[in-house]
Image (tube, coloured by chain):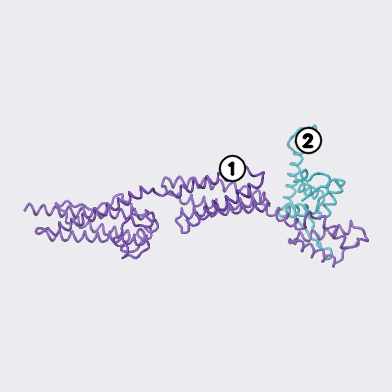
Amino acid sequence: MPKITDTEVDFILDDITRRGIETEDVRYNILDHVCCIIENEMPFEMDFYKCYEDTIARFYKKDLAEIELETRDLITFKYYYAMKRTLKITGFVSIVLILIGSILKFQHLPGAGVCLFSGLIFFSLIFLPLNIIMKFRDDKEKSSRLIMTLGMVLAITGSLGVIFKVMHWPWANILFYGSFLAFFAVFIPVFFITRYRNVDTRFNAIVQSTFMVAACGMLFALVNLGPSVNIETSVHSMAEFKSNNLQKIETNNANLYANLQGVNKISLQDFMDESAQLKSKLTGIYTNLFALSNNIPFDQAKGKKAKDLKHPNDFKVVNSGFDNANSEYSYSAFLAAVDQYNLKVAAISGNTPIEPIELGELQMTNTIVSVVLHELMDIQMQVLMNESAMLNYQNGVLAAK
Amino acid sequence: MYICIMYSSELIKGTLKTIVLNLLKDNERMYGYEITQKVKDLTQNKIQITEGALYPTLHALEKQGDLTTEKEYIGKRVRKYYRLTDQGINTMQDRVNELADFMKTMRFLLDLDVKPGHA
């Protein structure tokens, strides 16, 4: 065939573009190759368009876009071995960090959060996405790719949910339980059905689905096993018992005080005022924490009992409403009130049996709200016992006279 | 994508890069059509590289840094010449050695009177 004209070149270029060759370099390579074949191999008298059709058909099996796809695949996986190495390294690092983090967390040692956080970040944001890319290279079937993508996305959101939970960030439960539910209710059935249909993968589908259902079931049982009803009841009855005792001693003390006439009344009055001040502070902190935890106004929380807490394991409310609060109900305000009370006790104790309040090892920060409420009740009990001791002592003095 | 006319594609799969790199070692620079013709001539039509296999491979080798390209304009056409880089020479040597060793092993395995060894 004579030399290809510019018009024919334009025609070829347009046609190969229309057939799905988007990469410019590939387009020009094919154009030159087609021109070479037509010019060198086709009969001189043959029609150009017929020559072109015959030539271009040699380039593909189904359609010309195969070359574009193959090129992209080869270029995309240029870093295949580097990715494989990164996958191995990040997988190993993730496992080590997660294991160390878990041990530290279990032993309540510092560094657990950092280890778990970085391990899970490596796992969910590097290891799992790389895994998807690598699997895509090996499996070109659409349904398999869809299942793999779904599984990996759920694994990533689940891992992020764990990170959020460890770091006490919001939306942790939605991320974790959402992905867990979707994995159980969507992924496993889809995985099973699609794999079961294929005779080659049927046996593996049964085995792998069984593993996944069993693992999910066990995990579900674990994450949903809160304290048993019996334990909850016993904790509630303990709170009720303490509350009733406080009430009884309070009434008893009020009666004793009312009946006391005579000696040392001024000093007693002073002590009782100080005691009332501390009790008021304790009640205020109790009510404030309850109101914040149940998200109700302060006035509505007055007189509520610990058993009525909606979220007894609430950690955040203690952190924001007590530990780090800047109000009259903060931990520092509480310590100041106890110090003031102890100073008064020291000043007037003399021969009286009253004792200062020793907080000792009591941990009131970095804990859950129900624990703090119980601790406040215990301290209140100690204040009332001091009152009681003082009043009985004064009664004894009076009787001796 | 498919390479051959006489041998099964499974048999030759994986050797295309080696073939291309080795050809470019002997010929300073070549363009796509030239490569297919050269292979056809050298193998007396036993191996014909298809365009669908050749161009993705050339692009991949270029991206990997084994090949460098020069463009020449022929009217409205652009012809891309491929040339081995220094890295490409090393890659070619590695691949040829690997293939030679593999062939020796296969000859031993198939009892064709050659003992395996490292090339």
Identify the element where label 2 is drawn: helix
Residue A206 visible? The answer is: yes
| In the depicted structure, whether residue A219 falls above or below residue A25 | above
Q: On the image, which quarter does residue B106 sit in?
A: top right
Residue farthest to the right, as pictured: A45
Local packing at callout 2 (Cα closer than 10 Å; few below 14, some 14-19, many 20+) is some
Labels 2, 1: front one: 1
Find residue A329 and name its label.
none
| Residue A280 place in picture, x, y as percent | 25, 61
Identify the element where label 1 is drawn: helix
Find residue B107 and name its label.
2
Q: Residue at x 21, y 60 (%)?
A: A274
| Residue A241 place in picture, x, y as percent | 27, 51
Is residue A371 left or right of B6 when viewed as pictured?
Answer: left
Read off the residue under disc 1.
A207
Residue type (three-letter) at the residue carrying disc 2: Arg
From mark 2 to mark 1, how far is it between C-alphas? 41 Å
Q: On the image, which quarter does residue A8 sit in?
A: bottom right
Colour chosen for chain A? purple
| Residue A35 place in picture, x, y as percent | 85, 60
Is residue A112 left or right of B82 when viewed as pictured?
Answer: left
Local packing at callout 1 (Cα closer than 10 Å; few below 14, some 14-19, many 20+) is few
Where is the N terminus of chain A found, in terms of image quarters? bottom right
Q: Residue at x 84, y 45 (%)?
A: B6
Q: Chain of mark 1?
A: A
Q: Chain of mark 2?
A: B
Q: On the image, which quarter does residue A282 sit in?
A: bottom left
Colour chosen for chain B? cyan
Residue A127 visible? The answer is: no
